[in-house]
Image: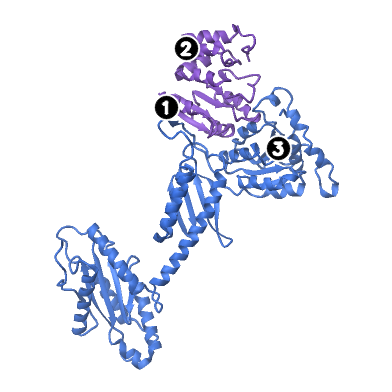
Amino acid sequence: MSTAVLHVAAADDSSTAIAAWLETHGCACWWCADAFEAVVLLRKAAEPADLAFLSTDRFSAAEMDLFPLIATAWPGTAVVAYGGGRLAAPAALPRGTIWCDTQAALQAVLRLAPAEIIRHASSLGAAQGIRTASPGSERVGGFDAAAGVLRSASADIMGHSRHAAAPVERA
Amino acid sequence: MSANAAAQAVRFASSRSRSRDRRGLTGLSNHAVRPAAGDEARSAAAVIRGAMIHGEPDVLVIGSQAVADAVAAAFPHRRVDYAPRPLAGLWAVAEERYGVVIVEGDSTGWQLRLIESIRGLRADVHLVAVSPATSEPSARIAVERGADDYLLLPLLVEELERVLRRPSRTRPQNHPPMRPVHSGEPHRMAGGGPSDDLVQLAQVLQSLDDGVQPMLRRFASLLMESFGAAGVKIRADALVESVGDVEEIVLVEPLRHCSSLIGEVGLGRSAMGTYAAGAAQRLTAMARILELAYALVRQQCELRDLAWSDDLTGLRNRRYFDQRLSELVEHARTERGRVTVVLFDVDGFKQYNDVLGHQVGDRLIQEIAQLLTRTCRETDVVARRGGDEFAVILWDAEKPRVPGSQHPSAPEVLADRFARVIEAHEFQCLGPSAPAPVTISGGLASYPWDGRTPEELLIAADEALLRAKRNGKNCIQLSDGGTASPES
């Protein structure tokens, strides 16, 4: 059975990489142009998505409320947020949220299969989101690898950072 | 914006300052809503619930507490809830108990998106935009995007009552659950881009000659593809054309002609999820084009109708008859059908003109035309070819021919029936001084037995008519089949 994915991104947003990833992995996909459309979908969808990609580049502050709404409507859905250069990550990301604050971080996530991303997200503690590191960080490199390495990357993120200048935050 | 911040919005303060004679909302009713303290108010999905009241549908205010309080004061018998955060409000809109949703904002950006999204979720809800007094032009845009009406701050009781009691202009609907689109299917929601729209629109306009119904069908298909709709339904006057699944119409735009409402165009649910931003606005623009195309094709039909009609009788004229006969013979050739041509004329018509005058002769022709129309089937083509000569095409409403089939008897029955009707009819226009009872003679020829081209059929029918005349008139003669050329 294919992975059901929600993709929230503006029509002209650079989400080609995600579209290609969806096709590569044979995912079934809902696409929404913004958070408002996504809320309509959350209300109307027959079943929850397994995974959601949210491009927060164009999000207004009000649209950041989409994160807790997804957590409420689809509690088991893993969320990957990307392109969030403009807005800071919410202080409290819901459980199962991977926050990619760089394109490199997103690309690292997209090297994984859907099941690996979901497994990684679900391994995050309750009420904890994670943030990938800034460009050049080794932690991004940690994300490159397969599931085994990913676990260590997760551990790294969870408190073993050696990069004081760009500390990885626990939400 | 937190719930507390929303509650501190200045809009209510400004309405407090209105003088009492303008019925500014200066007091809160017992049912005024209060923001809940603590966690609920801080939650993104928080909706502050007003007191439960049975009766009229509940009101949801997405905006400040001040506006919610104002609405609660104006409608003490309604439950008024409010959501200070837009997405939380949108989330709450799905609850069926809300009959009225009020969206406060400056009619730009997120407020418009919110209005469009609410419409995507609930087509049946009465949706009102509330904007600052200086934002009236943009508040009108909110109406274009899906709001039923708008109000300007500060809110006045009489305006609130007027606007909130007005019924929604959209239709009720139920939302089926949506399923994701599988990869390999189009990833984006909308269909073709603007250039595709233009190409298809040009094709629709180029085919106006085909008539109203085909034009409506093509336009419906265009809209279906352009909007990525599951179905489209167009009603224009008595004509209805629909394509796809139109069980649930979620977006409707009225159609007008010379300021009069003539119908509407409606989109079914989006085939790909929800409609993209600006869909309502695009539909409005497309409806204006449809109105123009409809008016054009109607005008064209009227002109063509004039060109194809006989002035005296209102029947089809010779030009139309000849064209239609060619089409029907061609159709019969490809579908193994049959076509019968019957030519009639009035026996001794000249004497009516000579004795009673041409005016009476004209009225006689008109009366015969009416009888002929009443006697023939709807599918038959009845025409006046000139003078006192009428022609009917009886084409194959029955089953196609099968190998070894015989010369048709049904057309002969119809022609005989017509002759008897004429004979039995009392023509009022003739009066007591009629030179003779009115009778007709006719000749009948059928494709493929009596002729394989329109010309051959007409010659065969004409020869049969001459034989009827020679045989004493007042009868219908079948062609002897002598004019048919060998089938190629």
Q: Nearer the viewer, residue B326 or A20?
A: A20
| Three-letter residue code for mark 1 | Glu
Q: Is label 2 on the same chain as label 1? A: yes
The tag on residue B80 is 3
How far from the left and from the top, in percent, is residue B236? Answer: 49, 57
Front label number (3 vs 1): 1
Q: Nearer the viewer, residue B356 or B300?
A: B300
Q: Residues within 10 Å of mark 1 (few under 14, many from 20)?
A: some
Q: Is residue B370 visible?
A: yes
Colour of the chain lettered A: purple
How far from the left and from the top, in percent, is residue B206? Answer: 42, 57
| Three-letter residue code for mark 2 | Ala
**SS of the residue at dot 3?**
strand
The tag on residue A145 is 2
Query: Residue at the front extreme?
Result: A136
User: Relative to residue B135, is residue B91 drawn left or right?
Assistant: left
Query: Residue at position x 63%, y 15% from top?
Result: A171
**SS of the residue at dot 2?**
loop
| Residue of label 1 | A23
Q: Residues within 10 Å of mark 2 (few under 14, many from 20)?
A: some
Colour of the chain lettered B: blue
**SS of the residue at dot 1?**
helix
Query: Which sits earlier in the primary sequence, circle 2 or circle 1?
Result: 1
The answer for how far apart the CA atoms under marks 2 and 1 are is 21 Å
Q: Is label 2 on the same chain as label 3? A: no
How far from the left and from the top, in percent, is residue B121? Answer: 57, 38
Residue A158 picture quarter: top right
Name the subunit of mark 1. A
